[in-house]
Amino acid sequence: MKLKVVFLSLLLSGCMQYTSPSHDTWDFYLNGASFMDMNETSKIAKRPVYLGHGGKLLNANIDKSATLDYGDKTTNDNMASREYMAKLEYDLYDSLRTAGVSVERAGTDVVVILVRDAIISPDVGDISTGGANVLETIAQLLRKYNSTYLEIAGYTDSMRDSTAARRMSLDMAERVGVYLSQKNINPARMFIVGRGSARPIAAQDGLGRLTNRRVEIRLAPAR
């Protein structure tokens, strides 16, 4: 009987609609996050905050006693970084075989593209049950590959009101950031931005509009 109760409880919890916490608590969940683009300058500036919040740099995982296979330390560290991100890319690609979700490589970085309808419920404007499942999978891998920064960027389709578009896109990005923070992803790893209708990846009509409404999580090695 107890096993049946436990099974039913797990089944119901897996089907329950996720609800983001009250908006006035988001600052708590995102404490340490940077609200700016992730680039080389901002990553260098963020490093003290990241380390101060318990962040771990990638080179801490490299065995310094080992013989350098590729020459000097910088070359060896770069090779280790590429291998680390390649493994992360493979694990993400293998785990996220879901409609509306794709994984791409951008140099050393890895980008996860989440079409809005794949993670946000159109009825309530919050993370859907399917979206929570996708983000839970991403969170599991982010905990495994914890020597990474992540830029969470929201985008909309073309809108007449650019201010509204930017506000809507930032709301999507922050919701994802709050969810990941709730799943023990250090917010000091995060850069969060809302880019409105900038950088479309499809035509601004029909299906293209649905594709342009998205959240991109760009992962970069923390060095």
Image (cartoon, grey):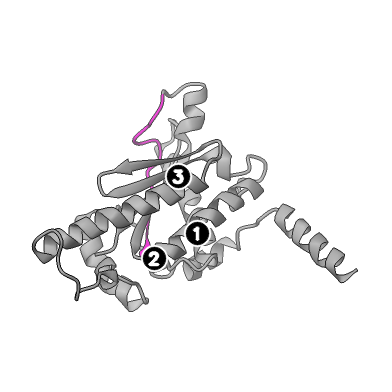
Q: Which residue is mark 3?
A: 93
Q: Which residue is mark 1?
A: 139
At horizontal 60% and vertical 63% (from top left) the residue drawn is 22
Vertical position of residue 107 compared to residue 177: above or below: above
Residues under numbered marks 3 and 2 in contact, where contact means CB atoms less than 8 Å apart: no
User: Viewer-proximal residue, 129 or 177?
Assistant: 129
The image shows residue 210, relative to residue 77, as above or below, that is above
Q: Relative to the observer, which residue lies in front, 157 or 43?
A: 43
Percent across and percent down for residue 60 are 27, 73
Looking at the rendered image, the disc whose residue lies closer to the viewer, 3 or 1, is: 3
Residue 146: which disc? 2
Asked if the residue at tag 1 contacts the one at tag 3, i.e. Cβ–Cβ closer than 8 Å, the answer is no
- State the separation of the CA atoms marked 3 and 1: 14 Å
Instruction: Report the span colored magenta.
Output: 189-202
Task: Find numbered disc 2 in the image and state the secondary structure of the residue it sits on.
Answer: loop
* Quarter of the figure with residue 106: top left
Residue 59 on the magenta segment: no
Q: Is residue 196 magenta?
A: yes
- Residue 120: x percent and y percent? 58, 44
Q: Residue at x 31, y 57 (%)?
A: 84
Q: Earlier in the sequence, mark 2 or mark 1?
A: 1
The residue furthest right is: 1
Q: Earlier in the sequence, mark 3 or mark 1?
A: 3
Q: Earlier in the sequence, mark 3 or mark 2?
A: 3
Image side of residue 76 versus residue 147, left or right = left
In this picture, residue 74 sits left or right of residue 153: left
Alpha carbon separation for disc pair 3 and 2:
17 Å
Hey, what amino acid is under mark 2? Asn
Give the quarter of the figure containing the N terminus: bottom right
